[in-house]
Amino acid sequence: MTFDDFNCLNRRDLIQTGALLGAGIALAQPLPLLAQSGALSDVRAAALAGKDTAIKRIRDWIALPSIAAENLNMPEGAAYFAGLARDAGFTDVEIIPTDGHPGVFGKIDVGAPRTLGLYFMYDVKQFTPAEWSSPPLEGRLVERKGLGTTMVGRGSANHKGPEATFLSALHAIRAAGRTLPVNLVLICEGEEEIGSPNFRQLVTTPRVLAALRSCDGVFMPTTMQGLEGNAAVELGAKGIIELELIASGNKWGRGPKNDIHSSLKAIVDSPVWRLVQALQTLVTPDGNTPAIEGWFENVRPLTEREKSLITQAISPVTEGQMKDAFGITHWIDDLPFPDALIRLAQAPTVNIEGLVAGHTGPGGMTILPNRAVAKLDFRLVPNQTRAEAVQKLRAHLDKQGFADVEMKVSGGYDPTETDENSRLIRTAMATYRKLGIRPDLTVRLAGSWPGGTFTQPPVSVPVGRFGLGTGGYAHAPDEYLLIESTNPKVAGLVDSVMAYAEFLYTLAAID
Amino acid sequence: MTFDDFNCLNRRDLIQTGALLGAGIALAQPLPLLAQSGALSDVRAAALAGKDTAIKRIRDWIALPSIAAENLNMPEGAAYFAGLARDAGFTDVEIIPTDGHPGVFGKIDVGAPRTLGLYFMYDVKQFTPAEWSSPPLEGRLVERKGLGTTMVGRGSANHKGPEATFLSALHAIRAAGRTLPVNLVLICEGEEEIGSPNFRQLVTTPRVLAALRSCDGVFMPTTMQGLEGNAAVELGAKGIIELELIASGNKWGRGPKNDIHSSLKAIVDSPVWRLVQALQTLVTPDGNTPAIEGWFENVRPLTEREKSLITQAISPVTEGQMKDAFGITHWIDDLPFPDALIRLAQAPTVNIEGLVAGHTGPGGMTILPNRAVAKLDFRLVPNQTRAEAVQKLRAHLDKQGFADVEMKVSGGYDPTETDENSRLIRTAMATYRKLGIRPDLTVRLAGSWPGGTFTQPPVSVPVGRFGLGTGGYAHAPDEYLLIESTNPKVAGLVDSVMAYAEFLYTLAAID
């Protein structure tokens, strides 16, 4: 559900999926010594002087976990982040309530011609301390082979670390005696890890909306470097709805209200069979294409330019490496590799995440269950919308005779699309190139993040993610952020701070 | 899987299901003072004198649990039961190995014209002591409201209690200075609770088979009384196969070998969708009738006599009571009640006991699972067989293009059918009538037990279950057997001992 959701897999999957999906693997190219001389050398000096403070900024924030799913430290987390924002120079910082957990809004208006929006989150994923090799709330510095010194803690990579790194860039610019080259508008939510259910409320709060609409684009600080030094520049992401379909005797008015003995199947209808029958209407017999009425009505096919970007990006990784990474031997329909990569970006999907009914333990148990649940996710592509998809799925089930099958939508959002010619994307590309980093244009992330809230009306501005450095194990134990890099291709903390500074100055200067 | 499997439901279901399915609820009729005078008064005197020993016989056996599923005390359990059999007068008692756990075989040959077979089990169901209000291995005597004094312990009802009660009848007859009126052949297995996977091996061991074929029938001691005093006489039971259908990336050669990120559904096949598609071919769209090719080929329709027995038996219980007990509002196809009861006996079923795939915990998780499992049971009616059903299901899946979907058969057996005019059934009816107990002919139990192993070739003898008294919570915590009855309609231990004695003498004397 979150843009980090690749990371809910196990560690091995995480590394492989992240490396392969995030971008093509670029050829090795050395990371330059960012701005050791040149226009921002004074900012660099300030960033170096502020390094210990910058490390402490991340560590102290990690010590206060806000977990929306557990309703843990939510007002405290909002207040803490508001303090961080004020310290970094934001004015008019306010905590904005929602129907769920509050958000934080703030601005820095320096009277510059250009304004950059910032999307932050102050919540983190749940964690189980026993699974960690280093305490998840201590932010200890731990050596990681091939990388350098990392900070281990919940939120270090997702997303307190990169966010605090960006704030440290603002501190460094100020410490160098400078005024920011652009204005900033900051919106921070506390429900990203539960699917941003109230984020639209935050964004459409009139004064927030007015501020966001004035932006050249909205971006989220993120560690985007691969181990070869290159960085992905995403032009979009699929949307998602995540939901449960539930067949039950109670709703159906047939079948049992509790689990009963399986011999009674002879005279009692089965909610499990009902679910199976409802499910199989959702896709083609091969399970690969949505068969929901009108599902493709608003789907925009990829352009030739987009397809060529996709096929150009793949050369550094072989098909065999990718198949091995995913543990598969065939793409859908035995597609050739370039076609598979185009389908990965292009196709809306209906996926079953889980099935739960009746006896789920070892062996059998002779029961006729009263209830069956399928957990599904639907990836949406432009110009599908979440609202359209929910409505069409309900209408389809009703028309197929499954009006009793409940839909419990737990979250989701529209697809995200940003023009590669937008100033935000051009700024990212130009910044990376200036820093000697190879940027890889990613046409559309097959995963999802709620960027569509900004790209679609009423905000309607470009979005992107940007940032050097690396981290890992988001959503998993031993989540980390690289602090001191021993890999010359990958930025550590100070270089990451400087990349954000370069980004702001590039945005101010670009056409 | 076992004939006690109604009891794997919760306590409430257990009581309701047992009361309603076991037999029609008869009108109240007082239990006579069994043989306080008359031909067996000397045996009754011996049974009364042996009562404390009979109680200890059950309790001591309960203290040694043999659990096949956990490979717990299996050789010990076989040896212990062999000792019980020798004590009760069986000769040539031997422990017979199988590919699984051993069985016990023994005989009592008194040179009588008639021979009765006995089916026993020495294994018990698993238990969790913390769930019990009285220690499961202590066999404590506990008062039970409306019933009297019960013994609580694992196996007290299923099946050590009734079996030990029968052995106590043999002790009483011997203590009265008598010779048994019939010969006995005893076969006891240790794998009843895991579906009797090696029972056919035991039964077809040449010397066992020869002995069983000499029997007028095989019966299992069982508490068969309802709280109104009546007792069911079953003419048969459905057979069963229990199995898992498994779709996986590994077997399919498509889809992933491990769970992968759900965004990859766009280019990777899904074993979960594959399972859903395979499942929906097994039944009609309403989920109520098997659609497996040739499934009904050998199904024998119920006779008019059988149908009339079914509809006659239902008068004491209302349709509303039964629906309430099962928590349903409609029978399949909105059948009228008599038709529903006929279908309950008549219809072979395909039931989904459970579905397990991917994320089964709360909420969602964006994964594409590599494996999906459906747990099914198939109830079989005469003249279907387990072997036929397994073969036809495999052939059906193969023909439908699902050769990769694995079938993991965990157990099962053929249907059971015994002629109501067989000497065994006539003996049961005559014994109950003699004792003033109303017998209810049950045409076919909708549940299953492995009696078909005896009724079908190569043994080919009638089978039945017989016994007064009552017990409950088989497979559940606080399993109990009635010892001292305060309900004048229901037999306690001594009356149950005497009913077995009466049964043996009736068998010897009947035409």
Image (spheres, coloured by chain):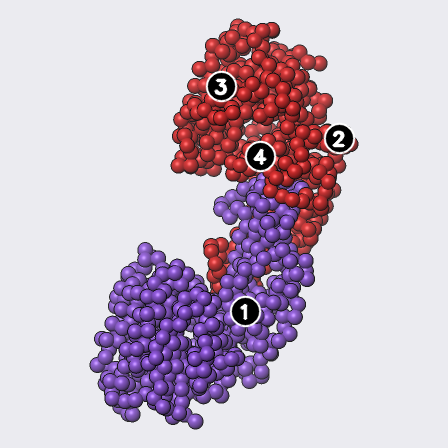
Chain colours: A red, B purple
Q: Using the numbered discs, state the Cα–Cα distance from disc 1 to disc 2 in whole angstroms.
A: 57 Å
- To the question of a shared chain for discs 2 and 4, the answer is yes
User: On what subunit does the disc labeled 1 rest?
Assistant: B
Whether residues under marks 2 and 4 lie with C-beta atoms below 8 angstroms apart, the answer is no
- Residue at 64% x, 37% y is A322
User: On what subunit does the disc labeled 2 rest?
Assistant: A
Secondary structure under tag 3 reads strand
Query: What number of labels is visible?
Result: 4
Residue designated by label 1? B379
Instruction: For label 3, count other residues whose C-alpha is less than 10 Å away and answer few (under 14), some (14-19) or many (20+).
Output: many
- Residue at 73% x, 38% y is A339
Tell me which amino acid carries mark 4: Gln
Q: Using the numbered discs, state the Cα–Cα distance from disc 3 to disc 2 in whole angstroms.
A: 37 Å
Residue designated by label 2? A308
Q: Position of residue A320 (x, y in %)?
A: 65, 38
Whether residues under marks 4 and 3 lie with C-beta atoms below 8 angstroms apart, the answer is no
Q: Using the numbered discs, state the Cα–Cα distance from disc 1 to disc 3 in whole angstroms.
A: 66 Å
Observer-side mark, 3 or 2, equals 3
Q: With respect to residue B47, does A339 lie above or below?
A: above
Quarter of the image with the C terminus of chain A in it: top right
Nearest to N terminus: mark 4 or mark 3:
4
Observer-side mark, 1 or 2, equals 2
Q: Position of residue B46 (x, y in %)?
A: 24, 84
- Residue at 35% x, 57% y is B128
Say which quarter of the image contains residue A342.
top right
- To the question of a shared chain for discs 1 and 3, the answer is no
Residue B448 visible in rendering: yes
Question: Which numbered disc covers residue A16?
Answer: 4
